[in-house]
Amino acid sequence: MAVVVELTIQPEDFDLGRVTAVTSDMHIELERVVPTGGDVMPFFWAKGSEFEEFERAVRENRIVEELEAVARVGNRVLYHVYWGDTVSSLTTILTESEATILEAHGNNPWTFRLRFKDHAGLTEFHNLSHEEGIDFHVERIYTLTEEETGVYTFDITPQQQEALIAAVSGGYFEVPRRTTLQDVADEIGISPQAASERIRRGADTVLRKVLLSRSAADLD
């Protein structure tokens, strides 16, 4: 099942981020197009005021062969960047993990919304990024079904979801607790041992996939 991940990444960890991080005044947004060549990030919007200074600094970067202003709309300019000898491997990682860039914008840091065909693609993205020393922070992971319905199961079983709902609504995780494990088990009609197992496994899955907004290494 297709999975979407929202993450933040520092500009120094990929070419477009490094090249455009020349002024704090400019906000960059990746143009969502499907490139016909090998470049994953050939077009981007820049929003700000000091465009001449920005363009001069970008063109002076050694990995930029050419920067072309394609369109100007108000205080936004659409650029086409022609890459030279790039050094970042993020483009390669996105390609090898078959990621689709749904959204990418920022300055410091950047926010990416990526779609993978399945969790295996996300795992490959994570592993390749870790090998190349590219650090990112996960903000949210969800399936397309969860995004469409607004109901997030986080890949937990219906039994785990039932146990977690009973535990949270009863105040099992509050300090001090307002309910006991026995009470939760009685509410859903199972033994305390089974309730404990469902709560722990369900909570672990949710924390790893959604609430854990630390380094990508924590997703191991």
Image (cartoon, helix red, strand yellow):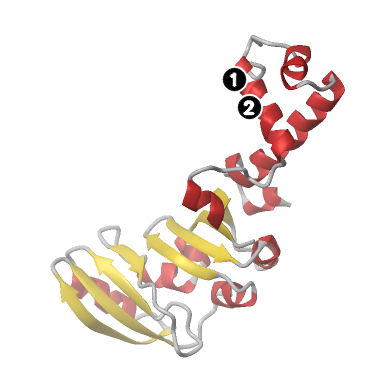
Q: Amino acid at mark 2?
A: Ile
Residue at (48% x, 60% y) in the render: 113
**Residue 10 shown left or right of residue 108 in the figure:** right
Q: Position of residue 173 (x, y in %)?
A: 65, 20
Measured in 3D between alpha carbons, the distance from the residue under mark 1 to the one under mark 2, in whole angstroms, is 6 Å
Q: Percent from the top left, x then y, of residue 11?
A: 45, 62
Which residue is at the far left?
74
Secondary structure category for the residue under label 1: helix
Q: Secondary structure at mark 2?
A: helix
- Mark seen at residue 169: 1
The answer to which image quadrant residue 213 occupies is: top right
Q: Which mark is residue 70?
A: none
- Is residue 62 depicted above or below 107 in this figure? below
Q: Are marks 1 and 2 in contact (CB under 8 Å)?
A: yes
Q: Residues within 10 Å of mark 2 (few under 14, many from 20)?
A: some
Quarter of the N terminus within the rendering: bottom right
In front of the other: 45 or 192: 192
